[in-house]
Image: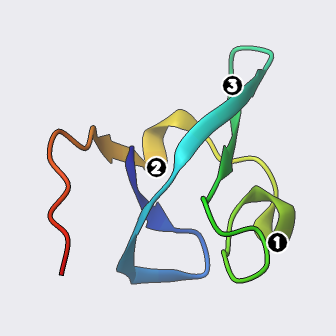
Amino acid sequence: MVLRDPDDEDRWLVKRVADTIGSDRVMVLGDNADRSRDSRAFGPVVPQRIVGKVWLRLKP
């Protein structure tokens, strides 16, 4: 999914949903645990931060 960074509104993050906490929060995780900024750093996010779903990945 694509979401706005909770700490920087101008930055977009691509993460996967790891868990839902009730109906008002989701835990998001990145693929690289050692370098990823995700819910382990900023906590669960509200679904309103989610702006879309990733449909295609291009390799550099």
Give the residue displayed 61% in from the left and 59% down from the top.
30
Instruction: Residue 12: give x, y in percent of width and height.
Output: 36, 71
Considering the numbered disc 3 on the image, is that residue within a helix, a strand or a loop?
A: loop
Considering the numbered disc 1 on the image, is that residue within a helix, a strand or a loop?
A: helix
Give the residue displayed 54% in from the left and 42% down from the top.
16
Q: Which mark is residue 41?
A: 1
Quadrant location of the C terminus in the rendered image: bottom left
Quadrant location of the N terminus in the rendered image: top left
Q: Using the image, determine if residue 44 lies above or below residue 41.
A: above
Residue, disc 2 = 49
Q: CA distance from mark 2 to mark 1?
A: 16 Å
Q: Which mark is residue 2?
A: none
Give the residue displayed 59% in from the left and 70% down from the top.
6
**Which amino acid is tagged 1?**
Ala
> Total of numbered circles in the picture?
3
Tag 3 or tag 1, which sits nearer the N-term?
3
Q: Are marks 1 and 3 in contact (CB under 8 Å)?
A: no
Instruction: Residue 37: give x, y in percent of width and height.
Output: 67, 75
Label 3: few (<14), some or many (≥20) within 10 Å? Answer: few
Residue 32, quarter of the rendered image: bottom right
**Which amino acid is tagged 3?**
Asp
Label 2: few (<14), some or many (≥20) within 10 Å? Answer: few
Residue, disc 3 = 24
Instruction: Residue 21: give x, y in percent of width and height.
Output: 81, 24
Give the residue displayed 27% in from the left and 38% down from the top.
53
Q: Using the image, determine if residue 6 lies above or below residue 45.
A: below
| In front of the other: 52 or 24 | 52
